[in-house]
Image (tube, rainbow, N blue to C red):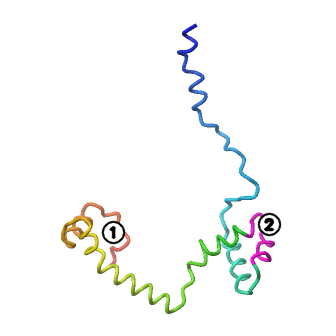
Amino acid sequence: HLHALDCPAPVDDANAAPVVPPPAKKSRTNTPWTPGEELRLKQMRDAGNSWAEIAKTFPTRTEGSVKKHWYKDMHYAEFAEDESQALLNAIKEYENNKWKVIGQKVGKPAKACEQYAKEHFPDLFANSKGR
């Protein structure tokens, strides 16, 4: 009778992940937004439509999910001219101070940190090669 307790089969079955995921709640969708949907959303927002009106044109999406997508994933892309300039200034200021701040945190000179990082973590700098 002890053999039945030692048998690992039930444990394996319990640990096996179900192949079929549980059905998603109907109120939420994780359907990616298409460029066409984003364009419609932008045009309706620009035209001054309410969130409720806009949401009605997206049968698979809730008013909340439409609003969230606008603010979280789309609206960030809009910068006024002065905001754009402020961002550029902040980037330049931060770029210059970055290694100084990092050096202070690590307790090493800024230049040493920058050199070491470029040699040992080249992936971090892959996008800034063209300077």
Residue 87 position, x and y percent, is 44, 84
- Position of 4 relative to 70 (above/below): above
Residue at the extreme bottom of the image, as rendered = 82
Q: Which residue is drawn at 56% across and 27% down?
A: 12
The residue labelled by disc 1 is 125
Would you say the residues marked 2 and 1 are in contact, meaning their CB atoms lie under 8 Å apart?
Answer: no
Q: Which of marks 2 and 1 is in front?
A: 2
Between 120 and 11, the residue placed more toward the observer is 11
- Tell whether 56 sits left or right of 76: right
- Please report the bounds of the magenta region as a residue range: 51-63
Between 68 and 105, the residue placed more toward the observer is 105
Which quadrant would the C terminus be assigned to in this image?
A: bottom left
Q: Where residue 48 is drawn, which disc sits there? A: none
Among the 4 quarters of the image, the one containing residue 15: top right
Residue 116 position, x and y percent, is 22, 64
Among the 4 quarters of the image, the one containing residue 18: top right
Is 117 inside the magenta-drawn segment?
no
Q: Residue at x 54, y 20 (%)?
A: 8
Residue 29 position, x and y percent, is 70, 59
Q: Which residue is drawn at 74% across and 70% down?
A: 63
- Tell whether 96 sits left or right of 24: left
Q: Distance between the residues labelled 2 and 1?
A: 43 Å
Among the 4 quarters of the image, the one containing residue 22: top right
- Which tag, 2 or 1, sits closer to the chain's start? 2
CA neighbours of label 1 inside 10 A, class few (<14), some (14 to 19), many (20+): few
- Position of 17 relative to 91 (above/below): above
Amino acid type at image mark 2: Pro
CA neighbours of label 2 inside 10 A, class few (<14), some (14 to 19), many (20+): few
At numbered mark 2, what does the secondary structure look like: helix, strand or loop? Answer: loop
At numbered mark 1, what does the secondary structure look like: helix, strand or loop? Answer: helix
